[in-house]
Amino acid sequence: MIQFIAAIIIAYLIGSIPTSYIAGRVTKCIDIRQYGSGNVGATNTLRVLGKKMGAAVLLIDMAKGAFCVIVLPAIFFSNQLHISLPIFKSCIAAFVILGHIWTIFLKFKGGKGVATTCGVFLSLSTIPAIIAILIWFLTVIISKYVSLSSLIMMVSLPFLILIFKQPRAYLILSITLCILISYTHRSNIKRLIYGQENKIIKNKPKGLTKSHL
């Protein structure tokens, strides 16, 4: 049990690393929470700091999830825990994503969890995750809405897990995360309904301004 507790605490702390916030401080000496949507995620980093930093934050946030579900089970999992490896990995996955969404380092206000979720499932269920990400890209190309694309991707993921007959623990995790990430996107959903959601930008912003992106 001690190994399990240690693993989920470490996963939470790794997930809590506020990549976007650090990028803003290091590159522009700004608090990214004061610009754009105020969110400390890859999309707001793209809008405020540009494509290169947006891509870097996206990859690092994905890497946080992948690292935790690959490395931590290798260190801490044991048959003496009396739980299966998929359940163990799913618990770690949940806590690294919770850390990203409610980071202890920024008064429990973090990102929306999409990038870290992608990193987790690319490691847990690679083929379903790749298809889900392709669905995300296709939806972005058609709609130009990152939030809508993320929501559609998350809704599709449990179905893909089922189709590819992945462990039940991964199915439960995907459904739980679908609900959780829909919750983190509640303001985006409201703006989508009222036609007020902003589309993804194609070019780096000319200046840093506070706006409701």
Image (cartoon, rainbow, N blue to C red):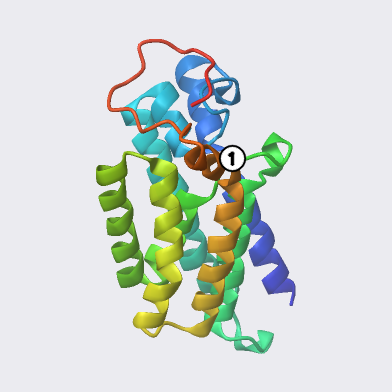
Is residue 75 visible to us here? no
Disc count in the image?
A: 1
Q: Nearer the viewer, residue 6 or 32?
A: 32
Image position of 26 with respect to 66: above or below: above
Where is residue 23? Give x, y as percent: 48, 28
Q: Residue at x 48, y 26 (%)?
A: 213
Where is residue 56? Give x, y as percent: 37, 37
Q: Which amino acid, mark 1?
A: Ser
Where is residue 29? Give x, y as percent: 53, 15
Where is residue 191? Give x, y as percent: 52, 37
Q: Residue at x 35, y 11 (%)?
A: 206
SS of the residue under disc 1: helix
The residue pinned by badge 1 equals: 187
Image position of 137 with respect to 78: above or below: above
Is residue 53 visible to us here? yes
Is 165 displayed left or right of 102 in the figure?
left
> Which quadrant: the N terminus?
bottom right
Image position of 86 with respect to 206: above or below: below
Q: Residue at x 33, y 53 (%)?
A: 136
Is 46 displayed left or right of 4 in the figure?
left
Which residue reaches farthest front?
194
Q: How many neighbours does mark 1 have within 10 angstroms: few (below 14), some (14-19), or many (20 or more)?
A: few
Q: Nearer the viewer, residue 196 or 45?
A: 196
